[in-house]
């Protein structure tokens, strides 16, 4: 089953909690600023993601979503 990991860059405040919690060291903080002036998290090593959802649960700003591919249009 394929999953998609989405970071809403403009919700992210760059707190780094997701970077710390990720057991696979997938995430890093970007050096590009977002529309609110924060440096957002991004997937530096997406191929290592195991879709454990820890980063989604940890994020205080609900900026990370994991969805099953092919279910985007299902409502
Ligand atoms: S889903 Fe798990 S492995 Fe993937 S980036 Fe988030 S914490 Fe890391
Ligand atoms: S936990 Fe959320 S707000 Fe913090 S860096 Fe990660 S995505 Fe951004």
Image: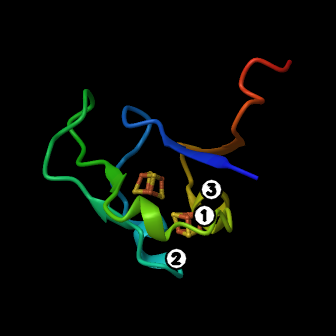
Q: Residue furthest left?
A: 31
Residue 10 in the figure: left or right of residue 29: right
Vertical order, 57 against 10 (above or below): below
Identify the image quadrant of residue 68. top right
Of marks 1 and 3, the one in the foreground: 3
Label 2 CB sits under 8 Å from any ligand 1 atom: yes
Tag 2 residue: 21
Identify the image quadrant of residue 45. bottom left
Tag 1 residue: 58
Tag 3 residue: 56
Identify the image quadrant of residue 44. bottom left
Secondary element type, mark 3: helix
Whether pointer 1 and pointer 3 mark residues with C-beta atoms closer than 8 Å, the reply is yes
Label 1 CB sits under 8 Å from any ligand 2 atom: yes
Distance Cα–Cα, label 1 vs label 3: 5 Å
Point out the tag, 2 or 1, that comes first from the N-terminus.
2
């Amino acid at each position: 089953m394929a999953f998609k990991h989405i970071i809403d860059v403009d919700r992210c405040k760059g707190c780094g909690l997701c970077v710390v919690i990720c057991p696979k060291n997938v995430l890093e903080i970007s050096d590009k600023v977002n529309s609110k002036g924060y440096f957002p998290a991004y997937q530096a090593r997406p191929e290592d993601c195991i879709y454990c959802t820890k980063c989604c649960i940890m994020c205080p700003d609900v900026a990370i979503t994991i969805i099953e591919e092919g279910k985007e249009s299902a409502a």
